[in-house]
Image (tube, rainbow, N blue to C red):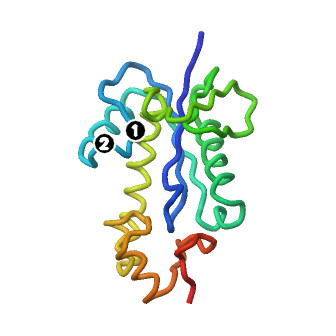
Amino acid sequence: MKIIAGTDEVGRGSLAGPVVAAAVILKKKINNLADSKIISPKKRIELAKLILQNSYYAYGIVSNQKIDEINILNASLLAMKRAILKLPVKPTEVLIDGAHKPDLEISMKPIIGGDSTEDAISAASIIAKVFRDDLMISYEKEYPEYKFKKNKGYGTKDHLQALRVYGSCEIHRKTFKGVLTK
């Protein structure tokens, strides 16, 4: 029996926080799945609840320090690998959003734009985004000057201005262009 998982990562272009991947094996069809970037935050949260109730899933997280150490591509692949290995059911094939695949002894199919065409990848994209957004929002209390609740760590005008004024904080990716250290 074929067991198909989808995996995707989020936070790749962020200036702060981890990169988060999710791996999902859908137990049943879920309507209206799409790339998390084109779904409204409210709809993403609704879909994430449905996905979590109707799938096997796992997350892989790679810290900003590790991203600085091994680069964002390798960190993204490591996050995917961690998510896939944590799945409670072993997939026979993994569909991956993008051109690169992690080093695992499982059949893998990289699909460019897969988060828009494959339900399992879309589902992974959605739950990873909701998980990471919640994590970045939680950093707002500790680092209010960076407005992580609003920008989720991405390089918005306000975030870049805060970096100019305050320098970087503990969760910033020091090797990323735009992150200034004081």
From this viewpoint, which residue is outermost toward the top?
Answer: 1
Q: Is the C-beta separation of discs 1 and 2 under 8 Å?
A: yes
Locate residue 176, reporting x and y percent. Answer: 59, 70
In the rendered image, the quadrant that contains the C terminus is: bottom right
Query: 3 and 182: which one is in front?
Result: 182
Residue at 69% over, 52% down: 74
Image quarter of residue 36: top left
Residue 149 is situated, as x and y percent measured from the top left of the image, at: 33, 66
Looking at numbered disc 2 in the image, what kind of residue is underneath it?
Ile
Q: Residue 99 appears in which quarter of the rendering? A: top right
For the point 63% across and 27% down, which residue is it?
109
Residue position for label 1: 35
Residue shown at 47% from the left, 37% from the top: 124
Residue 166's spot in the image, x, y percent? 45, 88
Question: In the figure, residue 173 lies in which quadrant?
Answer: bottom right
Determine which of the numbered discs, if any, sits on residue 39 in the image: 2
Residue at mark 1 to residue at mark 2: CA–CA distance = 7 Å
Circle 2 SS class: loop
Task: Locate the N terminus by quadrant.
Answer: top right
Check the image and report above or below for 126 versus 150: above
Element class at badge 1? loop
Hey, what amino acid is under mark 1? Answer: Asp
- Percent of width and height locating residue 100: 66, 40
Height in image: 42 above or below 32? below
Q: Which numbered dot is residue 103? A: none
